[in-house]
Image (tube, grey):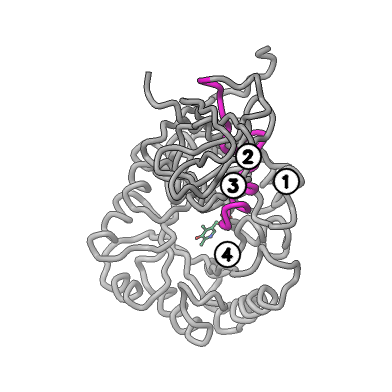
Amino acid sequence: MSRPILAYIDQAALKHNLSITRQYAPNTHIMAVIKANAYGHGLIHTAHALKNADGFALLELEAAIDLRTAGYNHPILLLEGFFSMRELALFEKYRLSAVIHHDAQVEMLSQCQHRGLHIFLKINTGMNRLGFPVEYFSTVFEKLSCNPAIADITVMSHFATADEAKGNDNFKQQLHLFNRITQTSTLSQHAQNSGRHHSLANSAAIIRYPETHRNWVRPGLMLYGASPFADQSAIDLGLEPAMTLTSRIIAIQHLKKGDKVGYGCSFRTDKPMRIGIVACGYADGYPRHAPTGTPVLINNRKYRLVGRVSMDMLAVDITEAADIQLNSQVILWGKGLPVEEIAHYAGTISYELLCAVSKRVKIVVNQERRKNAD
Ligand SMILES: *Cc1c(COP(=O)(O)O)cnc(C)c1O
């Protein structure tokens, strides 16, 4: 038998979350964000479950080519565009769309002989990560509008605080800037068929700000069934977790009062205790910073992690649970234990935990919801 840690991916949950996304944003196209190996869920079977999306977005060129080669005919958007002329040639070959966010890319486009490229022109409205400055936007837009390589331009931006307090100042300022520059008169003259398409919203904006939906929304996290908000759970939002990370108890220790557990002896028993050792550690993607008290789910009940998470194992207090034995299944997060809860204990966000699930964790795909299976 091999190591018992598995990530179950529920394709029915992915489909469900896509349909919930459509309910939040009924009058727009959905660009399903599947970067970082589909947030740790695995690229191709996630794309398969989400094939009713209108497009896919990611950053990894090889993964985009894999997707096209696997037969997906959707628009595929590369969120950082291309980095060289050699890559740009692959965009033509595989019909990939590119985010254009700096001058070097505009320069490469001016040298390119292709036709029919679809681009997303990114404006920096205040996140200050990628994108052209607002002041320079109409110049670069005009330049690209005259470039025969380019078939159409969607204007995009990205919010830094859509997940924070509703209507926060930074969010309002970013949206206001975006609206101001996309409504300038020079732009509309050149924008008969192009430049009127806008894309702004990530998961948080899809849920909270319908005025940002425009033509393309870009949901990531919500498709995987996690909440982007600190004050609203995935269940409140109607989402279902798509990944359940499970493992098993591979050893049980019977300890006396005063015994210690794990590296650094950071946990000491204050009474005789029974400790289950679970085959899951930080090399699997479980956060090392999850402290004593972080919940794990066994037989539908929560137990507390104790001591330090090590590379391959973690320890759980099962003193009160006679039903837990060697080989009992343990849920680290997913169905019955939201990943947000673990992220909260570990001082991080669910995005990081999902993406961090490592290669050595086998992915098992549940194709059909088990409706009347019992
Ligand atoms: C990752 C990403 C998204 C998706 O964000 P979520 O918060 O996961 O919905 C959308 N747009 C861009 C540009 C991104 O990089």
Q: Residues within 10 Å of mark 2 (few under 14, many from 20)?
A: some
The reply to whether the C-beta atoms of the residues labelled 3 and 2 are less than 8 Å apart is: yes
Which residue is identified by label 4?
Answer: 197
The reply to whether the C-beta atoms of the residues labelled 4 and 2 are less than 8 Å apart is: no
Q: Amino acid at mark 1?
A: Gln
Which residue is identified by label 1?
Answer: 23
The reply to whether the C-beta atoms of the residues labelled 1 and 3 are less than 8 Å apart is: no
Q: CA distance from mark 1 to mark 4?
A: 21 Å
Is 45 within the magenta? no
Place of residue 214 in the rendered image (x, y in percent of width and height, measured from the top left): 65, 62
SS state under label 4: strand
Place of residue 265 in the rendered image (x, y in percent of width and height, measured from the top left): 48, 47
Residue drawn at (31%, 48%), measured in percent from left and top? 62
Residues shaded magenta:
326-349
Q: Earlier in the sequence, mark 1 or mark 2?
A: 1
Which residue is identified by label 3?
Answer: 292
Q: Amino acid at mark 2?
A: Arg
Q: CA distance from mark 1 to mark 3?
A: 39 Å
- Residue 55 or residue 366, whichever sits in front: 366
SS state under label 2: strand
Residue drawn at (36%, 69%), measured in percent from left and top? 148
Checking the image for residue 304, the label placed there is 2
Q: Quadrant of residue 317?
A: top right
Q: CA distance from mark 4 to mark 2?
A: 50 Å
